[in-house]
Image (cartoon, rainbow, N blue to C red):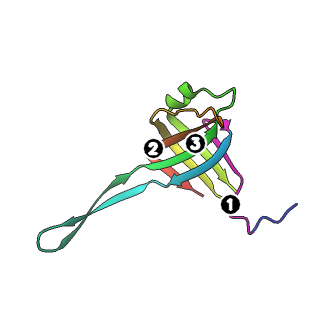
Amino acid sequence: MADTTNRLAGTCYLSADGVSYMLAGDFSYKVSGVTRETLTGLDAVHGYSEKPGAGAISASLRDGGNVSLADINAMSNVTVVVELANGKTIIGRNMWTLEQSESKAADATFEVKWEGPSVTES
């Protein structure tokens, strides 16, 4: 077995509600947390406001014959799980898709972005 202790990037596996999708290229994620905004006055910086921030998972997927863009676009309340080459597992719970995905015929890819209240890494 190959030693993978120094591997940081490369292979990546993505599924949504247990259905695996071909990850064509780009992948990114943002863990959920808080969003802060600096509050300033005419005299000084007063502090900041803080509110909950949604987590996000974005990917460039391959449009295989068994993929339905209509189903992807309609996703709501799904669990997205991603296994990264560095050993991390990203889990997004209660996620929904944003914007309508559009397939590109030249390379059979489409972009998808999920957002939701809980994206964690372990």
Q: Amino acid at mark 3?
A: Val
Of the 4 image quadrants, the one containing the N terminus is bottom right
Q: Residue at x 75, y 68 (%)?
A: 5
Q: Residue at x 68, y 31 (%)?
A: 64
Q: Which residues are magenta?
A: 6-21
Taking depth in this image into account, of 101 and 86 the one nearest to the observer is 101
| Mark 3 vs 1, N-terminal side | 1
Q: How dense is the environment of label 2, judged by Cα within 10 Å: few (below 14), some, or many (20 and up)?
A: many
Of the 4 image quadrants, the one containing the C terminus is bottom right
Residue occupied by mark 3: 80
**Mark drawn on residue 9:** 1
Residue occupied by mark 2: 116
Q: Residue at x 68, y 40 (%)?
A: 22
- Name the quadrant containing residue 69: top right
The x, y position of residue 100, in whole percent, is 47, 32
Residue 63, above or below 80:
above
Residue 5 counted in the magenta span = no
Q: Secondary structure at mark 2?
A: strand
Residue 8 counted in the magenta span = yes
Q: How dense is the environment of label 1, judged by Cα within 10 Å: few (below 14), some, or many (20 and up)?
A: few
Residue located farthest toward the front when viewing the structure as drawn: 106
2 vs 1, front mark:
1
| Mark 2 vs 3, N-terminal side | 3
Q: Going by the image, does 86 lie left or right of 36?
A: right
Q: Amino acid at mark 1?
A: Ala
Q: Amino acid at mark 2?
A: Gly
As measured in the structure, the alpha-carbon distance from the residue carrying label 2 to the one carrying label 3 is 10 Å
| Mark 2 vs 1, N-terminal side | 1
Q: Residue at x 78, y 64 (%)?
A: 4
- Name the quadrant containing residue 111: top right
Residue 99, above or below 39:
above
The x, y position of residue 80, in whole percent, is 57, 42
